[in-house]
Amino acid sequence: MESTSSDDEESLRDNNVDLNDDNLEHHLTLDVSNHLAESDNIFSSHQQFSENPEPFVGMEFESEEAAKLFYMAYASRIGFSVRISKSRRSRNDESIIMRRFVCSKEGYHMKKENFDDGKKKRRRPTIREGCNAMIEVIQKYYGRWVVTKLVTEHNHIVAAPSRVRYIAPEEYADMEPFLGMEFPSHEAAQTFYYAYASRIGFDVRIRLSRRSTRDESFVMRRFVCTKEGYAPLEENSDESKKKRNRTPTREGCKAMFEVMKKDYDRWIVSKLVMEHTHDLAIAPSKVHYIQSQTEVVVLAKSGTVNREKPVALANSGPQHVEAFGGFNNLPSIDQDPRIDARDPRQTAYGLEDTQRLLDYFKRKQDQNPTFFYAFQVDKTNCLTHAFWADGKAKMSYFCFGDAVTLDTSYKENKYMMPFVMFTGVNHHFQSVIFGCGLLTDESEASFIWLLENWLIAMCGRPPASLVTDHHDVISNAVSKVLPNTHHRLSKWYILNRLKEKFSNFYILHPTFEADLMKCIHESETVEIFEVRWKSLLDNYDLNESSWLHFLYNIREKWVPVYHKNIFTAEISVTQKPESLNKLFEKYFNTKTTLEVFSSILEHSLAGWYDRESLEDFASSYTSPVLKTPSSMLKQVSEIYTRTVFDIFQEEFVESLGYFVDKIEDGAICKYNVAKDEDVETSCTVMYDPLEKRTSCSCCKFESSGILCRHILRVFLTVDVRLVPEYYIIKRWTKDAKTAFVG
């Protein structure tokens, strides 16, 4: 028999609220400011807002949200969770003027009345231990929030979680809850439903839990909308006291999500109500913070566009925005031609912001002379452009700078800080940064300045290939600064814009996307692509589409078959490294000060460097599982990193299903390699028996540095049992970074 307890856990309100479960699992929902950093190091051992990471009486914050974020980060680093214990409002305008944050173990649970019904009662482990740890902040007359009370000692053991995970609601963008949905744990179910709620536009609390009679572990959790039920009416015993009317937060909403634990340790959605009795928010206001004994999950706001007007930082000089060509001037298939409207950004940051960023750069260079930065200011000494790269960025470029991407995604959102990144992929196929910049205008001269300073920082060595979004000013700047670099347009950017513009068409024609992907990704030759593209336009009656005609006219810049002999580090069309841009786009907006921005960025990037180090360690001290007892697989398993070996092994295993036909003999042998005698998938492999040199018409090795299944099949046919040294590219090996000298 299971027991049931009502865990009526509200999202943080202004009243005394407890957000804890009986097994030390803590759930905290805080309205966190946009300064929140999206990274595993968000709650690192280094304080983001002060050089002194410990709180102290008299400590000041710009806002209540900043104080919340500071104490939440401090609590997670030390090893306890937080709730709001007390608030005080102004009698003038009902605004909050005092907040008291306490340890979740503060106070004691109220004892319930004991009715003797003959049933044996079990003692519940209490999570309240009378802890006095707390911090209280009060808003002063000059607008700052000041710490007025502080207790740092705890009367219980504290232990920091072992890791922090960041979850964006967009990770579940295509997933709707349904009955029978399975999860590996109730925490995973909670994370999913919080992400769904954040994306849809409502907030969540835990309404009901049930525990096992055997070991007190959870066997059922019920999550509900925060507007579920009705707020109890308070009896006014003192008629002389005037009560203020509070806005009701409960509206009897029935929306809920219940999961139950099954025998095979999976959690199943057993009850589900999707409908709400109230209007949903355009964008939810909460950042969900879920802490257990082992980890912290930060679930950020949904990626919907911020409807609030941004606060201008500082302005000087006339506004200027360069007109962009290409996509923004093309019509959608279902609407009239139009130009996407974009509000101009400020042309410069304020003098105070500029000085603080410059001081930060100087400190970094004093700490490490390899740190590089470039600064440009206007006639009033306010920042217009900046570029910087640390020693790790330079090392990464030395080892992996053959294929570079210039990420300028900020242009798609006028509220985002004009932050640009030079990125690439390392030997674990993880994203790495080769430098960062700020551009307050989008002119050709600005991008020329950016590229020139980046090239100086990278010791004047241009990359083999550079990928950018499609904008005329960027293309012109690249052609002038990097004339010998192969410039490509981001295929992912183009396909996303196409899907956005053709959204209605995609819905009406479900097969269109699959046919388009086959045309773009599976065309082995230019001729096959041309035939498939024409067939695509004919079959879907799109010959009059100006969008598709434009994309066809620039096909040599973005369709893979046209640049397949250029190294791009694109191992597979199905594999795309995680976008570093997602790390910043939610929080680095025009409201963020440069001081906060630089601090958060530094700690965020530390998390990416840590990931690379962990993968280096794993590749060096673990051995992959071989799917076949092949001497070739054994050879490369000792050379390649784990990620690259997995890709090579997949090609090797797939090669076993291909047929080889020698079509020309001599000093250079010619083979036709195909699967199931399919002409469209056949490739031509040239092989030199003397030099053991080979090439394939698919050009996978030229573009990715990994041998294709066609060449591997020919190697097996001609009894080549080991990969020739020529075909092992150092940038994919475990020793990729050994030759770097700082």
Image (cartoon, rainbow, N blue to C red):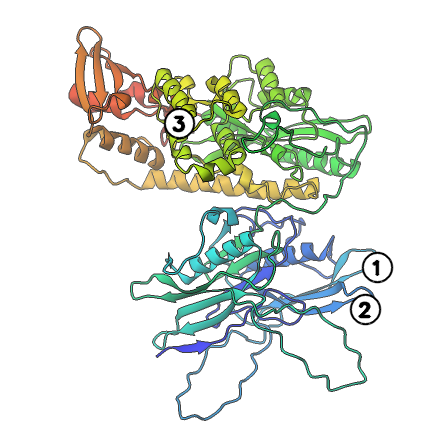
Identity of the amino acid at label 3? Asn
| 495 sits to left or right of 656 | right
Tell which circle, 2 or 3, labels the residue nearer the N-terminal end: 2
Res 566 seen here: no
What residue is disc 1 on? Answer: 141
* Proximity of marks 2 and 3: CB atoms separated by less than 8 Å: no
State the SS at label 2.
loop
Q: CA distance from mark 2 to mark 3?
A: 68 Å
| 492 sits to left or right of 539 | right
* Proximity of marks 1 and 2: CB atoms separated by less than 8 Å: no
List x then y, in percent, for residue 578.
47, 38
Q: Residues within 10 Å of mark 3 (few under 14, many from 20)?
A: few
State the SS at label 3.
helix
Tell which circle, 1 or 3, labels the residue nearer the N-terminal end: 1
List x then y, in percent, for residue 14.
67, 67
State the SS at label 1.
loop
Tell which circle, 1 or 2, labels the residue nearer the N-terminal end: 2
Res 379 seen here: yes
List x then y, in percent, for residue 122.
41, 83
The numbered mark at residue 539 is 3
Q: Nearer the viewer, mark 2 or mark 3?
A: 3
Q: Residues within 10 Å of mark 2 (few under 14, many from 20)?
A: few
Q: Nearer the viewer, residue 732 or 394?
A: 732
Q: Is residue 192 above or below residue 425?
A: below
List x then y, in percent, for residue 102.
63, 68
Q: Residue drawn at (53%, 71%), measured in percent from left and top?
A: 156
Q: CA distance from mark 1 to mark 3?
A: 69 Å
What residue is disc 2 on? Answer: 91
Q: Is residue 323 above or below residue 196?
A: above
